[in-house]
Amino acid sequence: MSAPTPRPGRFVRSPVVLRDGQWWLVSGAGSILASDPTFTSRLDGYAQAMVAADQTVGGLRARGSESPPQDAGGQR
C-alpha cells in the first residue's frame, strides 16, 4: 500500500503551506521556502499522517451511516 499523498494547502493553525510540492513558511511579512531536508521530511510525514487520519475518519463515518444489520435471532 502506498503512502497517502498530501494535499496542497496550509496546515490548520500553522504557518506551513505546501505549494507545487514544496513547503513554505508563510507570515504577514512574506514567505520563505523550507529547504532543510530533515524539516521537510518531517512535514511530509505529518501531512501523510493527516491524510491517513482523514481517510480513516471518513471510513468510520461511512460505516456509521450504514443501516445496522437485521437481527435474525429476535429480541434479547
Image (cartoon, rainbow, N blue to C red):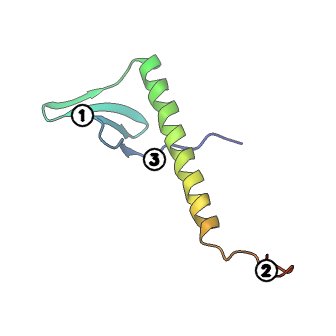
Residue 7: % across, % down: 45, 47
- The spot of residue 75 in percent (x, y) is 79, 80
Q: Position of residue 43 (x, y in %)?
A: 44, 30
The front one of 67 and 27 is: 67
In front: 3, or 35?
Answer: 3
Q: Which mark is residue 7?
A: 3
Alpha carbon separation for disc pair 1 and 2: 59 Å
Residue at the disc numbered 1? 26
Which of marks 3 and 1 precedes in the sequence? 3
- Name the image quarter holding residue 27: top left
The image shows residue 53 at horizontal and vertical percentages of 54, 46
Picture quarter with the N terminus: top right
Q: Quadrant of residue 63?
A: bottom right
| Point 42% across, 21% down: residue | 39
Q: Nearer the viewer, mark 1 or mark 2?
A: 2
Q: Is residue 43 left or right of residue 66?
A: left
Residue bearing the label numbered 2? 75
